[in-house]
Image (cartoon, grey):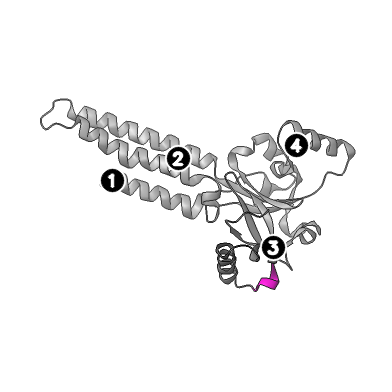
Amino acid sequence: MLISVGIALLFVTLMLLIWYPQPYFRASGADQLLTILIGVDVVIGPLLTLVVFKSGKKTLKFDLGVIGFLQIAALVYGASIVWQARPVFLVFAVDRFVLVAANELSDEDLSQAELPQFKSLSWTGPRVVGTKRPTTIQERNQLLFSSVFEQKDIDRMPKYYIPFEEQDGDLHNRVIPLDKLLSRDAGTRDLITRALHKAGREKDQVGYLPLLARKFYMAMLVDKTSGVPLSAVHVDPW
């Protein structure tokens, strides 16, 4: 039991600190995946052990070995799913940020990126990137077709990724005044106030943009001057 708990704690630490840094853990649905994995590792293994355990049983070592193997196999399989679903890019596209997971990008997608830093997937949380617009009618038509019929928009096309600092004026023009969120209920105001305090900013220095993640829509607070994302808050941005 202690070994199972230790493995689970190690895996949680890996997820929270490296693969799914806050605030993307819950937004990516990793909390649900983690619940399943812990259930397999901490609950199912020990329960099966209690079922088969009988002192002096001739096949006890074999039974425990099978349980251990199944437990490890399930954990490895679950870990691979969590790894494939990790967030790798935080993409500004048109008027919002989109959190893109590793399993949403194919090798072909990555190979089409113009810059080398966008041809590989991050191991330590999402890279913040901007996007450039298609320059030809053919590209614009292809993007429209992909968005409508393939449900794949520019945020999942690394060939349009650019360094975030090279993003044009679209971001600054799209930033929404923070007063829109602060005018809501006390709970929302408290979340925003705490995020501002943590970021070391005053409210007149900050705006926000919608953040689309796998499980939630969130509000991404951004510096009005630089456009740099500061903190994602679990409130409805619309």
Determine the residue located farthest toward the top in the rendered image: 59
Q: Nearer the viewer, mark 1 or mark 4?
A: 4
The numbered dot on residue 147 is 4
Near mark 3 (Cα within 10 A), the count class, few <14, some 14-19 or many ≥20, is few
C-alpha separation, residue under disc 2 versus residue under disc 3? 40 Å
The answer to whether mark 1 and mark 4 are in CB contact below 8 A is no
27 in relation to 69, above or below: below
The numbered dot on residue 180 is 3
Determine the residue located farthest toward the front in the rendered image: 185
Relative side of 183 to 43, left or right: right
Is residue 207 shown to the viewer in this render?
no
Give the image location of residue 40, x and y in percent: 36, 37
Of the numbered discs 2 and 3, the one sitting upstream in the chain is 2
C-alpha separation, residue under disc 4 versus residue under disc 2? 31 Å
The one nearer the camera, 208 or 105, is 208
Q: Quadrant for the N terminus, please.
A: top left
Tag 2's secondary structure?
Answer: helix
C-alpha separation, residue under disc 1 versus residue under disc 2? 17 Å
The answer to whether mark 3 and mark 1 are in CB contact below 8 A is no
The numbered dot on residue 79 is 2
The numbered dot on residue 87 is none
Of the numbered discs 3 and 1, the one sitting upstream in the chain is 1
C-alpha separation, residue under disc 1 versus residue under disc 4? 47 Å
Tag 3's secondary structure?
Answer: helix
